[in-house]
Amino acid sequence: MSLTTKFLGRTYASPIMNAAGIRCTTTVELDQLRQSSAGTFVTKTATLNPRSGNAGKRLAALPNGSINSMGLPNEGIDYYLDYLTNLPDHGHDAFLSVAGFSEGDQLAVLSKIAASDFAGIVELNLSCPNIVGHPQLAYDFEATDALLAKVFAQFGQLELGVKLPPFFDPVHFDQIAAVLNKYPIKYINSINSLGNGFFINPDTDAPMIEPKSGFGGIGGGYAKPTALANVRAMRERLRDDIAIIGTGGVQNGRDAYDLILCGASMVQVATLLGEEGIAAFDHLNAQLQTVLTAKGYPNAEAAVGQLVTNV
Ligand code: RRO
């Protein structure tokens, strides 16, 4: 019995890891993730220059999840590259999440990575919902196509995946999959938070968070059905060699298992990790192992995509 999974030729002891943004901004947090029972880790999304993010209360717990408008606070690409390239494996088993505010920005970040000793996996975040004046890029299929054309023309040597926002319509699943299938993309990560939700604090009658007049990305339990739908819909549409990371609404081992059944080879945890800290990985691993054993799977990899469709 094991939780072993494979992803881009790497073998991980567990498919469960953090989602970008959660407890992964500083080297202290990254060290804690490395020492935890997570299968591996991803950094906070890095930009060309450090950012302090949006001002005011920008993250709040909700009855069944969370709302955030962090605004991409991070230490800048150089900081994360320095950390990762100084690991014994040059970050081979890790993920580096990156974003830019323009095509030029994105390409500049990637050229820094390409010029470094980083040996790991790059995740292009096309779905941050919280930057005023910058829409979630992956909702613009033409702009996504144009960016990926440039990215792969210049940085085809990188092992690169994309973090996607949730889609809600079969036509949109078709359209984004058609774009992604054109490129040698290694994986997708579905989903980012449900963008621009809203929640009112019953004590104050004011929005729960301050930036953007209270609009923010929704995560946790609210996200689970949409995350499952996106992983399943994308698995049905993407080339077989494009792997999937499932993210959204993982509160217990069964939630992780459901994402795996839909086609996820790795599973990321955001809201629960924010609330519980790295002990969350111990609970989730134990619960996922119990489900896999009860269902007769020898490891996590064997359950990937095994959704039953003929009952
Ligand atoms: O920092 C954020 O506000 C943030 C990002 Br970059 C993201 O991709 N998803 C999210 O919910 N928040």
Image (cartoon, helix red, strand yellow):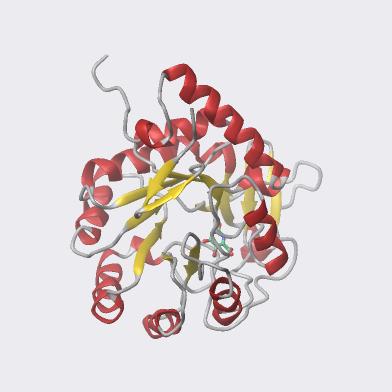
Residue 294 in picture, x, y percent from top left: 48, 17
Residue drawn at x 58%, y 28% as measured from the top left: 287
Q: Is residue 205 left or right of residue 157?
A: right
Q: Is residue 11 above or below residue 111?
A: above
* Residue sitting farthest toward the right: 203
Q: Please tell me in which quadrant of the rendered image residue 151 appears.
A: bottom left
Residue 49 in picture, x, y percent from top left: 57, 83
Residue drawn at x 28%, y 71% as measured from the top left: 148
Residue drawn at x 61%, y 78% as measured from the top left: 79
Residue 190 in picture, x, y percent from top left: 41, 49
- Between 37 and 270, the one nearer to me in the picture: 37
Q: Is residue 27 above or below residue 291?
A: below
* Residue sitting farthest toward the top: 311
Q: Is residue 39 above or below residue 214?
A: above
Residue 231 in picture, x, y percent from top left: 36, 42
- Between 263 and 52, the one nearer to me in the picture: 263
Q: Please tell me in which quadrant of the rendered image residue 145 appears.
A: bottom left
> Can the viewer see residue 141?
yes
Q: Please tell me in which quadrant of the rendered image residue 130 appears.
A: bottom right
Q: In what quadrant does ligand 1 lie?
A: bottom right
Residue drawn at x 26%, y 56% as measured from the top left: 176
> Can the viewer see residue 208?
no
Q: Is residue 234 left or right of residue 216?
A: left
Q: Where does the C terminus fall, quadrant-wise?
A: top left
